[in-house]
Amino acid sequence: MKSQKDTEEELFSSEEDLDLNPEDVFFMNTESMPSITLSPKVHDQLIKPWQNTIVVKLLGRRIGYRALCNRLESL
């Protein structure tokens, strides 16, 4: 399993910018509510770094980082 530092560097140190074209972003203002719609290409670019992410809710309990890693690896 990758260390937390390696994972963070992989996610946040990417120097790639989104490849945006004017036709990839749609702005609308309907009934005084603004809306921004992204093309499937941009949506896929935004999702790519987060595809293998899991959200863990601890329900108010405290758990150490290593214990959390062990529990997730056992799933």
Image (cartoon, rainbow, N blue to C red):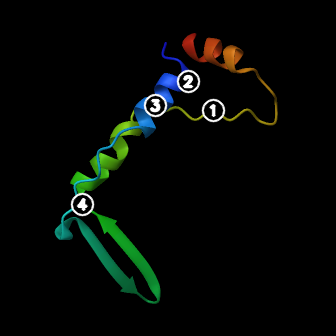
* Disc with the residue nearer the chain's start (4 vs 1): 4
* Disc with the residue nearer the chain's start (3 vs 4): 3
Image quarter of residue 19? bottom left
What's the residue type where badge 1 is placed? Val
The x and y percentages for residue 5 are 54, 25
* Disc with the residue nearer the chain's start (1 vs 2): 2
* Disc with the residue nearer the chain's start (2 vs 3): 2
Specify few, some or many for label 3: CA neighbours under 10 Å numbering under 14, 14-19, or 20 or more: few
List the residue tagged with mark 4. 39
Separation of disc 4 and disc 2 at Cα? 32 Å
Separation of disc 4 and disc 1 at Cα? 29 Å
Camera-nearest label, 4 or 2: 2
Asked if the residue at tag 3 contacts the one at tag 2, i.e. Cβ–Cβ closer than 8 Å, the answer is: no
What's the residue type where badge 2 is placed? Gln
Asked if the residue at tag 2 contacts the one at tag 4, i.e. Cβ–Cβ closer than 8 Å, the answer is: no
Specify few, some or many for label 1: CA neighbours under 10 Å numbering under 14, 14-19, or 20 or more: few
Query: In the picture shown, does residue 10 fall above or below 48?
Result: above
List the residue tagged with mark 3. 9
Asked if the residue at tag 1 contacts the one at tag 3, i.e. Cβ–Cβ closer than 8 Å, the answer is: no
Asked if the residue at tag 4 contacts the one at tag 3, i.e. Cβ–Cβ closer than 8 Å, the answer is: no
The x and y percentages for residue 56 are 63, 32
Residue 64 appears in the picture as rendered: yes
Camera-nearest label, 2 or 3: 3
List the residue tagged with mark 2. 4
List the residue tagged with mark 1. 56
